Image (cartoon, rainbow, N blue to C red):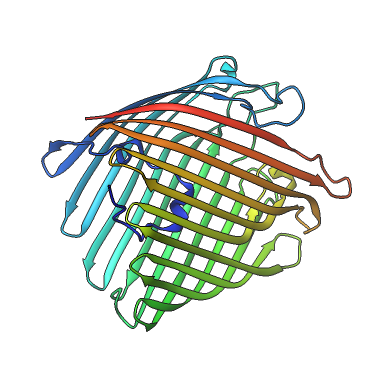
């Protein structure tokens, strides 16, 4: 059976899908001097029983057959331990009976890992393109088009000190800007901070982390705030089969015209490899977040999200993926008064079949159940359920 070679896969990546190029067993490539190019195309057909993710009103329970067409070209280069990658992609999503919701995303993503020497390393990522908020609308049933935005995103992490040293540190920062064509939801998020590690046992380090996140709806007055986190914790690789991290501390929220608010937050993640062909990951976070449904109200959330994923390689060609997430949060106004309670359950299952080295067929199902309870007549509860089915095929070089 095929093994999972990277137990150190970050737990935070459990909620993100792989690119289609990486998903096939052996994509192959075209040599362009020092650069390798891998072209890829995929197509899918499925069904979405709640395209607009609404529980009531004219847009509720609008189902449709879904067609997906994707084209990508991945470029990779490597020098020693340093790697460089960029992917150009165009992805079209069409609905047979809800054509107003059709959209095409176009963008380029990059990932750079630079090893200067054993004590200095740099990781950088970027994502630039024109994307859409699937499942949302520009203006309800008046304009059912998916909101379109131009995205500029980048992040840097600089590590100083050998990974085996007694002490080391990471400095990090990120920038994410979305400019919408309509709706007044332009937003900008910046984050920066530092993490210091002290290795007091082999493969186990104590850590201290300080970071600040700034969120701003640039077209709305006073729809912005800062989140500052002070965290203590551990980072460990207990055995060859498990590793993880745990951070606990205080988070503080500052916003215009309101007093500083704070509460206890955490970030915990564990990866476990019981056998070479099965990977289990569990993560949980408690944090603030910006409520994007109505930026003019400057609402925000605070709550807990837990995710569990399981990847299993049954044979050399067949594997499965399962994931479950649960979030429990309060939606609060700018003054900190709770407007509604919200819980979201999400379950996903997928089967992958590597037909040939460069051909893959996948079948997947995703279920979402969002439940909200209004508090004191502040706002309408927005409940909905959604099932999404997809059968897709991927062809690489």
Image spot of residue 273 (x, y percent):
38, 59
Residue 350 horizontal side relative to residue 54, left or right: left
Q: Is residue 147 visible?
A: no
Image spot of residue 154 (x, y percent):
41, 51
Q: Is residue 368 visible?
A: yes
Q: Residue furthest top?
A: 97
Would you place residue 252 above or below residue 375 in this image? below
Residue 291 horizontal side relative to residue 93, left or right: right
Residue 262 horizontal side relative to residue 121, left or right: right
Q: Nearer the viewer, residue 369 or 225?
A: 369
Image spot of residue 252 (x, y percent):
65, 68
Q: Nearer the viewer, residue 55 or 323?
A: 323
Q: Nearer the viewer, residue 282 or 144?
A: 282
Q: Quadrant of residue 64?
A: top right
Would you place residue 71 above or below residue 239 in this image? above
Residue 152 horizontal side relative to residue 394, left or right: right
């Amino acid at each position: 059976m095929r093994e999972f070679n990277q137990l150190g896969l970050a737990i935070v990546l459990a909620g993100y899908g792989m690119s289609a190029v990486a998903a096939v067993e052996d994509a192959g490539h075209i040599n362009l001097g020092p650069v390798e190019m891998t072209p890829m195309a995929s197509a899918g057909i499925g069904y979405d029983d709640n395209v607009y993710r609404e529980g009531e009103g004219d847009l509720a329970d609008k189902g449709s057959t879904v067609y997906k067409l994707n084209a990508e070209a991945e470029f990779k280069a490597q020098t020693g331990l340093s790697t460089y990658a960029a992917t150009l992609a165009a992805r079209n999503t069409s609905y047979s009976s809800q054509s107003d919701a059709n959209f095409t995303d176009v963008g380029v993503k990059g990932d750079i890992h630079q090893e200067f020497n054993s004590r200095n390393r740099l990781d950088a990522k970027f994502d630039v393109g024109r994307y859409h908020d699937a499942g949302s609308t520009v203006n309800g049933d008046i304009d059912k088009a998916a909101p379109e935005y131009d995205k500029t995103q980048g992040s840097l992490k600089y590590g100083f000190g050998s990974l085996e040293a007694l002490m080391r540190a990471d400095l990090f920062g990120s920038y994410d800007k979305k400019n919408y064509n309509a709706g007044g939801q332009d937003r900008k998020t910046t984050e920066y901070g530092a993490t210091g590690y002290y290795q007091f046992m082999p493969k186990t380090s104590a850590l201290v982390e300080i970071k600040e996140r700034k969120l701003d709806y640039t077209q709305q007055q006073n729809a912005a705030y800062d989140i500052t986190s002070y965290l203590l914790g551990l980072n460990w690789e207990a055995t060859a089969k498990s590793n993880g991290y745990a951070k606990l501390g205080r988070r503080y929220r500052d916003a215009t015209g309101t007093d500083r608010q704070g509460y206890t937050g955490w970030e915990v993640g564990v990866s476990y490899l019981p056998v070479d062909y099965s990977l289990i990951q569990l993560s949980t976070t408690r944090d603030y977040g910006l409520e994007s449904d109505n930026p003019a109200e400057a609402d925000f959330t605070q709550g807990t999200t837990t995710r569990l994923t399981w990847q299993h390689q049954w044979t050399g060609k067949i594997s499965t993926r399962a994931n479950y997430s649960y979030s429990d949060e309060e939606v609060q106004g700018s003054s900190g008064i709770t407007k509604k309670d919200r819980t979201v359950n999400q379950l996903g299952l997928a089967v992958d079949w590597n037909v040939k080295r460069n051909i893959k067929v996948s079948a997947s199902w995703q279920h979402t159940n969002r439940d909200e309870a209004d508090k004191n007549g502040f706002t309408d509860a927005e409940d909905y359920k959604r099932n999404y089915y997809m059968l897709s095929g991927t062809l690489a070089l």
